[in-house]
Image: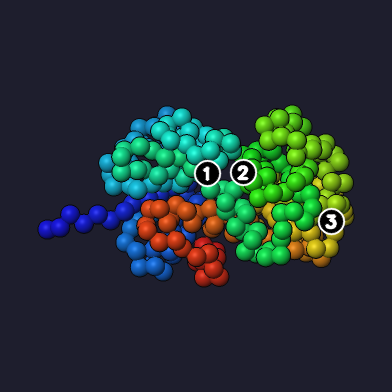
Amino acid sequence: MTDHHIPLAGVLGNPVAHSKSPRLFRHWLRKYGREGYYLPIRVEEKNLEQVIRTLPAMGFAGVNVTIPHKVAVLDIADLVTDRATLIGAANTLIFRRDGKIHADNTDGYGFIANLQQNAPGWKPDSGPAAVLGAGGAARAVLSSLIEVGVKEIFLSNRTRPRADALKSEFGSRITVIDWVQAGNMLEDCATVVNTTSLGMKGQPELRVPLDGLQRGTVVTDLVYTPLRTRLLREAEEAGCVTVDGLGMLLHQAVPGFERWFGVRPEVDVDTRAAVLK
């Protein structure tokens, strides 16, 4: 008999059955010939801390965290990265050998990596960015845009106080625009990002006027169900460079897989196909 350890990882959420992450990780485990398992784990909020503190003893190397637990895990973790603190949420937990729980947020990394891969001509200093929405996803996008050097960001949200609150946190690079004027802020922007759920299957459409979009503008939608939202379809018709939201999901998973299973995976055509199958 040998004491052979097969690493375990998973995704915590409620609900979690819809998550594409298990399919993604199974693909990478097969592709790179790594032993391991990645499981969807449905956890109610009242049981969250107990479950997280039990997982390391069960052989888990870490977990991804999705709605509605991304904020609550910050209070459970022993160590929190600066970017997770700034964003105010964590999507990755690493169970260290010294017993400590390390919380990180890789959403911003995934967002930038998706742009760099699918809009290779995109440059952070090419002009202002317009961001629609002021929720948790917007926090990750704003922090990453500022980190890579975008000098000016226009931010608009259906309820203005939430956008104003983000400006007070993230600083003077951000200018808040009323939602009814959101279409006007697109005209001079090199980058446009939808971080809202508008346009997602089962949600209302994004009704912001898009006639201000300019040819060559990089337009990305964090929604990936459907892959081609109204925003991306009309942006493509206007001559924009469009980037769908699936790539962000794929890239944000890269650091966790590398840490838990020992190899840095590549996000390629086969990866997208495996997740969409």
Q: Is residue 108 left or right of residue 260?
A: right
- Decide which of tag 2 and tag 3 comes sooner along the chain: 2
Badge 2 amino acid: Ala
Q: CA distance from mark 1 to mark 3?
A: 31 Å
**Residue at x 42%, y 56% (from the top left corner):** 258
The residue drawn where x is 77% and y is 32% is: 160
The one of 224 and 247 positioned closer to us in this rendering: 247
Return the residue at label 2. Answer: 140
Mark number, residue 90? none
Using residue 145 as the reference point, say whether residue 261 is left or right of it: left
Q: Quadrant of residue 177?
A: top right
Residue to which mark 3 is pinned:
213
Figure check: 13 above or below 190 = above
- 243 lies left or right of 213: left
In percent of width and height, residue 129 lies at 76, 49
Q: Position of residue 153 (x, y in %)?
A: 76, 44
Residues tagged 2 and 3 counted as in contact (Cβ below 8 A):
no
Q: Amino acid at mark 3?
A: Leu
Q: Residues within 10 Å of mark 1 (few under 14, many from 20)?
A: many
Q: Residue at x 30, y 43 (%)?
A: 97
Q: Which residue is mark 1?
A: 105
For the residue labelled by badge 1, is the local secondary structure a helix, a strand or a loop? loop
276 to 194, vertically: above or below: below
Is there a contact, CB below 8 Å, between mark 1 and mark 2? yes
Q: Position of residue 134 (x, y in %)?
A: 69, 38
